[in-house]
Image: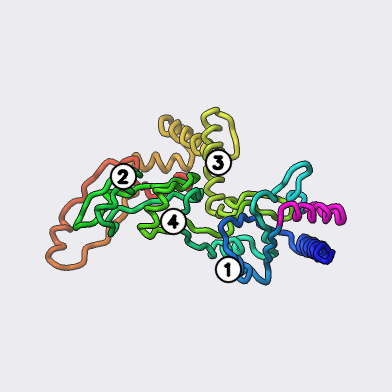
Amino acid sequence: MVAEERVSQKKKDYRKRLAEYLQTYDKAFIVNADNVGSKQFMDIRKALRPNSVILMGKNTMMRYCVEKYLEETGDHRWECLVKPGKKGLLEGNVGIVFTNGDLSQVKDEIAKYKVGAPARVGATANEDVTIKAGGTGMDPSQTSFFQALGIATKINKGTIEIVSDVVVVKTGDRVGASQATLLAKLGIKPFKYGLQILKVIESGAVYDPKVMEITDEDMLSSVITAIREVAALSLGASYPSLAAAPHIIIDGYKNILAIALETDYTFPLAQKVKDYLADPSKFAVATAPAVGGAASAPAAKEEPKKEEPSEEEDMGFSLFD
């Protein structure tokens, strides 16, 4: 009877604490805690204080507490945690990191606490595991491990040497017995475990953590690319748009200028081009005189070579002056 009362009191305290967090904070991370040790948890909790807190617990208990909180308060910001008829975001070995701080800073702080771990048989790889080419320090009698995994080796100075880099486990694959044994013999701890952010909640909105990696430069690049595509489509379809307007105006001006050069019709800007074509020397830039000495005398006698102006040559004025 006493034990039941203690359990009941713990549940009440847990519900009260969760309700307090839901009311106090408006941002949170849903995190996966697989392979995270107790010491690692303590370090993360300590690093996130005082602006953030981590709440773990049974998914059924968390869902129950959230549902009761929503019924009592009508706070719709946290409905995403328990969608009607579904498990919502509380599924698997997950917890909630509540915060009122900057999400990017909290995310970076969580990422600092990752611990290396050896490859265990049956574990799912969270990244590609690559063995680099080079000496292994293992004697030739142990080549069977490499042969079982199809790794090309050679004997060099009495030890096994891997010929080239090789991926022994790919992301999402399970670690086999031979792979785990070989990695252990080589002293490789391929995996790093920590709190893995699954979803981000901000004022009721839920989005993927990859969204936080988008920078201002990425957004600007996307906008510029979109404007270019709209302009190209408008020009190709002969459909005027704001994005294509500068190109349409420039093309129109070039056509008018070409007509003016081939006819007697003129206007101030076209006249400048006509004058240049008639006598390019008027627009030649005077070169500075050579400074003293015998070497400058022959250069002064040489007549400047006259060249026909090319299309890329600077005319000395802008077409829009």
The spot of residue 51 in percent (x, y) is 68, 69
**Secondary structure of residue under mark 1:** helix
**Secondary structure of residue under mark 4:** loop
Q: How many marks?
A: 4
Say whether marks 4 and 3 touch (CB < 8 Å): no
Residue 37's image quarter?
Answer: bottom right
| Magenta stretch, residue numbers | 58-77
Given this view, does label 4 or label 3 mark the residue nearer the observer?
4
Given this view, does label 3 or label 1 mark the residue nearer the observer?
1
Q: Would residue 202 be found to the left or right of residue 237 on screen?
A: right
**Secondary structure of residue under mark 2:** helix
Q: Which mark is residue 189?
A: none
Residue 151's image quarter?
Answer: top left
Q: Which mark is residue 147?
A: 2
The spot of residue 245 in percent (x, y) is 56, 38
**Secondary structure of residue under mark 3:** helix
Choose the circle earlier in sequence order: 4 or 3: 4
- Measure how far apart labels 3 and 1 are at the Cα level: 49 Å
Q: Which residue is mark 4?
A: 190
Asked if one can make out residue 23 in the rendered structure from this viewpoint, the answer is: no
Q: Which residue is mark 3?
A: 226
The spot of residue 62 in percent (x, y) is 75, 55
Name the amino acid type tagged 2.
Answer: Gln
- Measure how far apart labels 2 and 3 are at the Cα level: 52 Å
Name the amino acid type tagged 4.
Answer: Pro
Name the amino acid type tagged 1.
Answer: Lys
What main secondary structure does the magenta stretch of the protein show?
helix
In the image, 144 versus 313, the foreground residue is: 144
